[in-house]
């Protein structure tokens, strides 16, 4: 049991230190973020939901990598330079029973010993063996642990979290996993794109005009600040060719400072503004330094160019701060509470016009991410829940007893084995398929088109068919490889006869081929279900996207295509019958595929010892078909309902000015 305890303790170490490693920067900041990079850790660059999701992916990836390295330590560690972790002496398993018979007589000299333990056994194993009862009424199970040396599992855990000397290969893998997790959450690409969108809409904050009219009150700008802009305009005019851009940057700086640094605009949200206190202080310092330099007497042409550059960078950084405020719910631009004064109301209207570009740009990507998250969560939850129920109920017990040729079995053992198998097949295939879809959707080809083709409403079969085959093949191969790896570890590394992988290369290839032929049909079913989940997700996404676009075009009195009108009508008319139709598709697909795949597994299992297909094999086929049919029906029904009721961001009217806002649906 000490090896199991050490393994779980190592997992705990990785979980405890993973957040600190996740929060390290894994990206090139560029000119737009390097001025604030010391204040912007990754968890501040996105909303808590996106950060938590990315952190979960990163931690889960580390744990899986850790378990793989522990399970195949004898093979993998020497390849990556970690052979020092492997124990040089000691048996890989504990003795099954202490010997009470005297040693046989021999003419040879006794073997040298170290302490009281023979050299072929470590001291700890010697003492554990001697503490065991000398007479046992029951045989001792030789494979009660996982046969992973504690020094290997603990050493790897400490290395992976940086508490022990690092291994270069693991450092590179950790950096790649962290970078991938950050990209999943849009770190730092989201804040860069969002701040650029705000900069493009900065003209909304322009309050200085050449006329005598004073409209600065709606920006909560004081009279001295307005006069400062007038003075800067007069001083910089002879020196700057881009005078309008310079004044616009000064206006953005003054308005953002008045609204958020001086907190003149009362529109606070539920987020923690104190998290950005360091950034606020830095921006306040740079603002004071900027105006101090601009007010210097006898400022040369080069000096004014430097002031203009500093103003441009500071305005950009203020846009970054506003984008982070909006993302972290520090501000609520569309707060429905009445404004206390007329100037506050007018300032809120200006803020809404300023940040409106964010909501127009992020609504559809937000819907896509929400759909992916819902599909992934519900599919995994249904697979594991139905698997546990199957293991507890009579059908699962009957199937398990047929497989193991026994009259009774332990419920918890069934739950453990069924759950591991379901995760390695259906869950992994679904994760791979949805991740593949997300990566392709967020990628742009050289011709400017998206790389993902909607498989429910495709443009042409030559576009969706290769994509579907690629998705199916990747999900199938990853699931099969994981199942083969688990089976190899269980059968080859946990048996005393295979301590050092003594099989030849030809025997190893034969073993892999047999397992592929047997486990492949199981993963084939999982890949089919993952493909169907992706098609359903594509179908719902096209409907809710076209419906949202159609509503926007109707409000702006723009013409819509016939296909968009049809999809919008289909979205409005979705009902329970549509979900039941997806149930019928999923159940029928599994009803056809499962018996065929189960028969292929039977052929693979009996290729060395051929026999006829008997009533036991028929029973196993029936139970497997029942399990997969019910699973597909549950996944399709629940996923169709949740994507219809919860994934779409519907339009609602703003009673203040009649503008259309994109608001979240039911959480």
Image: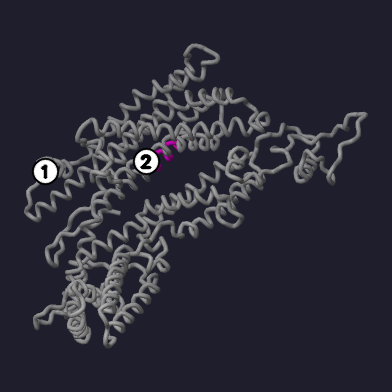
Tell me the SS state at disc 2.
helix
Which residue is at 88% across, 32% downward? Answer: 102
Q: Residue at x 20, y 68 (%)?
A: 202
Q: Is residue 566 visible?
A: yes
- Judge from the rendering whether residue 573 lies leftward or rightward of residue 420; answer left or right: left
Labelled disc at residue 449: none
Which is nearer the N-term, disc 2 or disc 1?
2
Distance from Cα at disc 2 to Cα at disc 1: 31 Å
Question: In the structure shown, which secondary structural element does the residue marked by tag 1 occupy?
Answer: helix
In the image, farthest residue toward the front? 301
Q: In this rendering, is residue 198 above or below 378?
A: below
Q: Identify the residue at image location x=42%, y=52%.
A: 179
Task: Please identify, in this view, whether the residue under mark 2 or under mark 1 is nearer the observer.
Answer: 1
Position in image of residue 133 (x %, y %): 78, 39
**x and y percent of residue 88 in the render?**
71, 42
In which quadrant of the rendered view does residue 591 lie?
A: top left
Image quadrant occupied by the N terminus:
top right
Question: In the displayed structure, would residue 293 be above or below residue 480?
Answer: below
Left or right of 232, for residue 278: right
**Mark 2: few/some/many CA within 10 Å (<14, 14-19, 20+):** many
Magenta segment boundaries in residue numbering: 380-389
Q: Is residue 177 above or below residue 349?
A: above
Q: Is residue 388 within the magenta segment?
A: yes
Residue 338 visible in image: no
Look at mark 2 in the image and give the residue it sits on.
379
The residue to which callout 1 is attached is 565
User: Is residue 151 inside the magenta stretch?
Assistant: no
């Amino acid at each position: 049991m000490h090896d199991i305890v050490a393994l779980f303790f190592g997992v705990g170490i990785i979980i405890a230190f993973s957040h600190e490693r996740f929060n390290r920067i894994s990206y090139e900041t560029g000119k737009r973020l390097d001025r604030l990079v010391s204040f912007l850790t990754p968890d501040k660059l996105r909303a808590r939901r996106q950060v938590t999701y990315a952190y979960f992916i990163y931690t889960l990836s580390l744990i899986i990598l850790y378990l793989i390295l522990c399970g195949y330590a004898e093979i993998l560690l020497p390849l990556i330079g970690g052979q020092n972790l492997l124990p040089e002496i000691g048996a890989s398993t504990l003795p099954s029973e202490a010997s009470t018979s005297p040693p046989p007589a021999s003419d040879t000299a006794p073997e040298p010993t170290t302490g009281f333990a023979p050299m072929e056994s470590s001291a700890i194993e010697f003492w554990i063996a001697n503490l065991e009862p000398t007479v046992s009424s029951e045989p001792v199970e030789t494979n009660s642990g996982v046969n992973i040396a504690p020094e290997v599992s603990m050493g790897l855990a400490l290395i992976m979290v940086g508490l022990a000397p690092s291994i270069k290969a693991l450092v590179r893998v950790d950096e790649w996993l962290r970078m991938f997790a950050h990209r999943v959450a849009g770190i730092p690409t989201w804040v860069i794109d969002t701040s650029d969108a705000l900069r493009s809409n900065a003209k909304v904050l322009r309050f200085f005009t050449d006329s005598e009219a004073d409209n600065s009150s709606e920006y909560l700008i004081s009279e001295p600040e307005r006069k400062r802009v007038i003075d800067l305009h007069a001083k910089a005019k002879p020196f700057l060719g881009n005078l309008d851009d310079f004044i616009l940057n000064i206006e953005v700086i003054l308005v953002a400072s008045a609204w958020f640094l001086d907190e003149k605009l009362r529109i606070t949200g539920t987020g923690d503004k104190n998290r950005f206190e360091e950034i606020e202080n830095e921006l306040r310092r740079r603002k004071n330094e900027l105006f101090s330099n601009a007010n210097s007497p006898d400022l040369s042409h080069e000096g004014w160019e430097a002031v203009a550059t500093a103003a441009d960078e500071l305005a950009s950084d203020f846009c970054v701060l506003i984008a982070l405020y909006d993302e972290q719910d520090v501000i609520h631009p569309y707060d429905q509470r009445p404004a206390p004064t007329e100037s506050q109301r007018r300032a809120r209207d200006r803020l809404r016009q300023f940040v409106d570009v964010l909501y127009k740009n992020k609504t559809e990507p937000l819907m896509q991410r929400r759909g992916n998250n819902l599909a992934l969560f519900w599919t995994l939850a249904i697979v594991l829940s139905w698997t546990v129920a199957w293991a507890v109920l009579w059908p699962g017990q009957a199937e398990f007893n047929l497989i193991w040729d026994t009259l009774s079995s332990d419920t918890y053992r069934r739950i453990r084995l069924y759950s591991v198998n379901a995760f390695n097949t259906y869950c992994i295939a679904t994760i791979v398929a949805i991740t593949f879809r997300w990566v392709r959707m967020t990628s742009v080809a050289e011709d400017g088109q998206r790389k993902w083709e909607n498989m429910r409403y495709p443009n042409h079969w030559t576009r969706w068919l290769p994509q579907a085959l690629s998705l199916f093949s990747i999900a199938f191969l990853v699931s099969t490889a994981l199942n083969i790896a688990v089976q190899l570890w269980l059968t080859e590394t946990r048996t005393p006869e295979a301590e050092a992988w003594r099989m030849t290369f030809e025997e190893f290839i034969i073993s892999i081929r047999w397992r592929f032929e047997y486990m492949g049909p199981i993963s084939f079913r999982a890949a089919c279900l993952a493909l169907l989940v992706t098609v359903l997700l594509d179908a719902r996404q096209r409907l809710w996207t076209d419906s949202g676009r159609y509503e926007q075009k109707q409000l702006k009195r723009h013409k819509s295509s016939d296909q968009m009108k049809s999809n919008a009508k289909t979205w409005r008319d979705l009902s329970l019958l549509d979900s039941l139709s997806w149930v019928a598709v999923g159940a029928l697909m599994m009803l056809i595929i499962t018996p065929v795949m189960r028969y292929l597994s039977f052929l693979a299992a009996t290729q060395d010892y051929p026999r006829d297909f008997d009533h036991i094999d028929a029973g196993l086929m029936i139970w497997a078909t029942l399990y997969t049919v019910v699973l597909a029906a549950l996944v399709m029904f629940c996923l169709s309902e949740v994507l219809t009721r919860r994934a779409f961001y519907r339009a609602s009217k703003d009673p203040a000015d009649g503008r259309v806002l994109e608001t979240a649906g039911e959480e």
